[in-house]
Amino acid sequence: MTRFNPLVEAMRPSATLAMTAMANQLRQQGIPVIGLSAGEPDFPTPQPIVRAAIEALGAERGFTYTDNTGLLALRQEISLKLKNHNLLEYSPKEIICSNGGKQSVAQALMVLCRPGDEVLIPAPYWVSYPEMTVLAGGTPVPMPTSVSTEYRITPDQLEAAINQHTRVLILCSPSNPTGSVYSPEELEALAEVLRKHPDIWIISDELYEHVIFDAKHISFASLKRMKERTITINGFSKAYAMTGWRLGYAAGPLEVVKAMDKVQSQTTSNPCHLSQLAGIAALQMSFDPIAKMVVAFRERRDTVLTLLNGIDGIKCPKPEGAFYLFPDVSSFFGKTTPDGSLIQTAGELALYLLREAHVATVAGEGFGDPNGLRISYATSLDKLMEACRRMKVALDQLQ
């Protein structure tokens, strides 16, 4: 048997990609599956971005390697955006552009984690955080939350989790997979704990900052004495409907960005030149297309939340951002399906919904919460209403 790098062998495959693949297999068999598993906006990339790319392609120019950290013009625009929207002062030298926000998080962990280091990860978490930590040689330490706290950690919980091995805290607000958003007061309370532990770094994943409804987004690095040990992660995939363009960025202390630059130089090098030009257009364009998407996402959230909470046995807090719902479905554990199969886990429930209702969700086990399901509402309202109808019928059949 071939043996591989033990760090790779310790990793698990992405639960979201696995469910998407299963749904696609059923579609190829002619089964009309409604996919609520992928975190991808169903809106087209805004026209100003597309036009900029088309114009660049039409120009008589070569798309050569750029600076490893990204085009200076793009990093200047990001610097301006961070100053105007996030109250953060970063020079272009303190910014690195990568092939999506995912790469930015992974490289930050590679740089910061040392053997024996622990990384605190509030759960439910994005499926890749623990696996990236493992690949970087660190030890992921989940911090469980629940519906009762609307999936947010508390200062006391953070303090109790910290020990001499703690190296990094990953925060994601607005959250994938729950849509929860930390209030300014809650973030300040967490920062107050961290000020007592100056050796801990914070990776603040803010990819969904513009997809926010009933809350205010605060960049963690903007809080007192946090900037010098926070790496702010962001990108273009979600707010600008640019998932396939693969463009993200990180901003942080120069020493960290230089180390991330070194990693990137020996792996992927710079992100796609054309995507970087499109990113400049994205940051320069009117905010109107984003605002329209957020209005649509809010309507979908409100509709799906109402329909889900109308199903007996489901408990789901109201998300304040992103485009996910994370209902607690543990009340269905121990019930049997019409064919006599026993539902014991969220994974088994997700498979039942896929096979019986032809609705693809993602089980909470992959997100560090075995009691939940992640439901993405990044699809049309008609499909969402039909999906909820199908799920209700299927769940009502459980005995």
Image: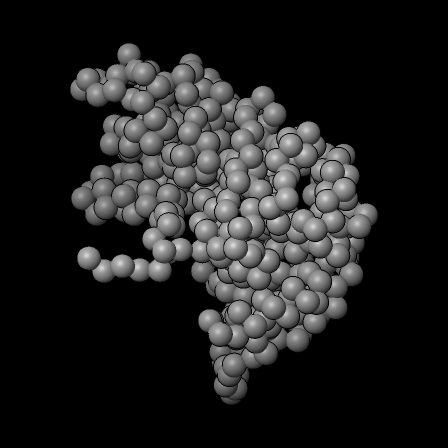
Q: Is residue 49 visible?
A: no
Task: Between residue 224 and residue 296, name the one nearer to us.
Answer: 224
Residue drawn at 49 percent across, 74 percent down? 266
Give coordinates of residue 234: x percent, y percent. 61, 55
Task: Between residue 151 and residue 46, name the one nearer to us.
Answer: 151
- Residue at the top extreme? 399
Q: In the rendered image of this protein, does residue 238 appear above or below residue 299?
A: below
Residue drawn at 46 percent across, 24 percent down? 328
Q: Quadrant of residue 73?
A: bottom right
Residue drawn at 45 percent across, 60 percent down? 244
Give coordinates of residue 261: x percent, y percent. 58, 71
Q: Is residue 163 left or right of residue 315?
A: right
Residue drawn at 81 percent across, 48 percent down? 224
Q: Is residue 93 left or right of residue 344?
A: right
Q: Quadrant of residue 196?
A: top right
Q: Quadrant of residue 382?
A: top left
